[in-house]
Image (cartoon, rainbow, N blue to C red):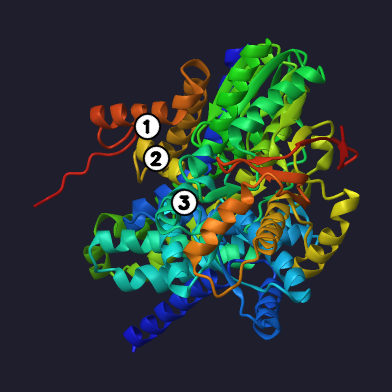
Amino acid sequence: MKKVLSLALACTMLVSVLAGCGGGASSASSGAAASGAASSAAASGAEGGVFKIGGIGPTTGSAAVYGLATKQGAEIAIEEINALGGVQFEMNYQDDQAEGEKGVSAYNTLKDWGMQILYGCTTSGSCAAVAAESYNDRIFQLTPSASSTDVTSGRDNVFQVCFTDPNQGTTAAQYIVDNALGTKVAVIYNNADPYSTGIYTAFAAKASEIGLEIVSTTTFPSDTTTDFSVQLTDAKSAGADLVFLPIYYTPASLILAQAKSMGYAPNFFGCDGMDGILTLEGFDTSLAEGLMLMTPFNAADEGSKDFVTKYAAAYGEEPNQFAADGYDCIYAIYAAIEKAGLTPDMDAQTICEKMIETFTASDFSVDGLTGSGMTWSTAGEVSKQPVGVKVTDGVYVNM
Amino acid sequence: MTFLSYLINGISLGSVYAIIALGYTMVYGIAKMLNFAHGDVIMVGAYVSFYATSLYGLPTWASVLVAAIVCTVLGVTIERLAYKPLRTAPSLAVLITAIGVSYFLQNAAQLAFGSSPIVFPSAVKFEGIRLFDGQLVISGITIVTVLACIVIMIALTLFINKTKMGRAMRAVSEDKGAAQLMGVNVNSTISMTFAIGSALAAIAGVLLCSAYPTLQPTTGSMPGIKAFTAAVFGGIGSIPGAMIGGLLLGVIQILGSAYISTQLSDAVVFAVLIVVLLVKPTGLMGKKMNEKV
């Protein structure tokens, strides 16, 4: 009797674990509803069939915030495009928990499903692993947010919608000097994260080139690190008047709080990973007052309003830059398909060659939420202008 | 002065490890199993306290109480469902089950609370003490955590040494079979251990998130592992050892990253752990047990 009971309970446990994966840990069940609507519209509205887009990103695990945002942003774009008639999309989004080996198995699942174009991955580590596969199979890949150069280097089929890490680092150093934001700079970065170290390396190189003095460089080992007292004390005692934080917003929120409690008030300057700090639930936005960051997307911008409204209606939260990158990805794919005159009956390899040709064509540019007139180099890197924003009274104000 | 402020930061980090380590060591000392899900029970406790305050407007003390009750129930349920059926199984099976429970709790929390981090409002409103014109700050939460650690440590020691239930726990710890023959209800004793351990986890969760205010489903896992290390460092199973181990671990981590390298902060911690275990395999305060063959 007891065995039966424990077996039943074990089964319940297993089912709920599986439910955890299937539900994508989405806080909004409306997300699933929206994607369902998108794919059914695709099925009914298609005359010449639909393009099968495979998506990969973490919808569970510690990076789920980013994966869910890119997934949901893309869903909004697909819904809009399918409503137009014409080219129709269907997306199958697989979870990779931001891990390379899970990314590759998600990729294989999508290949079996008949994916023609790959949208993803969200994170650089997984994306580099998947890109090696897609390069061999000749499947066109566009990532919304995997910003490492490891993702694109040597692979002509992989393109990015986000800035590369080195690009952000050099731009940040130049920006600080041009706008005279600080003279003595401290850097705190995550040395286990290729995104963070990638930006730091380029930033340090550029800084020494243009004579920006870095007085303190400290690291932390993971985004779950909670104590930054050593790093801040080091920056403070070195007399830094600007602290450069090429890191994600979760550790950054702790840094801001701890700096305040030790009475240290330099300028803080972040990159696109900082975006999202203001919408962090329960965050005291007064801590971020005066925080500067470079982000390609400002939800308060006039041009983003329509997207922000739709996103909020579907998922009950304000979209961040990852969602906007995802939205732009789908529109870039859409624009390239239109321009090249592709049809859904083509195989993935043909589509791939045509897409590469179109993306690198000199007259191909896309106006998106994260930048107007985006163009791509043959290396797969995007060219667009970053926008510097400063937090003033709890909202982004363009600098 | 900088050294003093590093030391204080180390103590404040260490006191959080210590309070988590107390729960670890308590369960290990009596049930002789490593409850790797302890860190995740902490996370659940913090979430319960957060929602009790933000949704139902309960005062802080009441939200801690609610969290302690929920965690107690959760801990006892986990024990009943996942560990009790394995009472006679090899300890490796129990260990793996505990890791499974840990993942289960993380994923269930992600489903229930969402994966976005939230900022936890500090449960301690007291600003702290500023010395030497604010050059040295001892935050309120550090003081409260250290005090809570000491109180819990003393209370647990008294409970285990002076009460009937405590005596039963010691008996179960020493020899389950013999304890049962002497009329000790082994199952309810172990359940009681988990109940106390989980209630402590709830308090640790609130204090952890008050000190370092981001809360997400994976919040408990890293501090959980560090606290486990602290418990081993101090001598697993020893209650004062957990406290000392936790404090030392925090201080070593901060001083190591301040004076050696921030890149090596964790490496320094574990290097010290290895040295301690080589010299004293049972940890700083651990008792040497002679196994009779």
Whether residues under marks 3 and 1 lie with C-beta atoms below 8 angstroms apart, the answer is no
Q: Is mark 2 on a helix, strand or loop?
A: helix
Q: Is mark 3 on a helix, strand or loop?
A: helix
Q: In percent of the image, x 76 and y 37: which residue is there?
A: A385
Residue B5 visible somewhere in the drawing:
no
Chain of the residue where label 2 is placed in the rendered structure: B
Q: Is mark 1 on a helix, strand or loop?
A: helix
Q: In which quadrant of the rendered image does the N terminus of chain A lie?
A: bottom left
Q: Residue A131 carries which label?
A: 3
Q: Which of A241 and A36 is in front in this view?
A: A36
Q: Is A78 rendered above or below residue A259?
A: below
Residue that carries the numbered disc 1 in the rendered image: B270
Please state which of the two labelled residues, at mark 3 or mark 2, is closer to the viewer: 3
Whether residues under marks 1 and 2 lie with C-beta atoms below 8 angstroms apart, the answer is yes
The kind of residue on which mark 2 rests is Thr
The x, y position of residue B47, in whole percent, is: 65, 58
Label 1 crowd bin: few (<14), some (14–19), many (20+), radius 10 Å: some
Residue that carries the numbered disc 2 in the rendered image: B229
The x, y position of residue B50, in whole percent, is: 70, 56
Residue A38 visible somewhere in the drawing:
yes
The kind of residue on which mark 3 rests is Ala
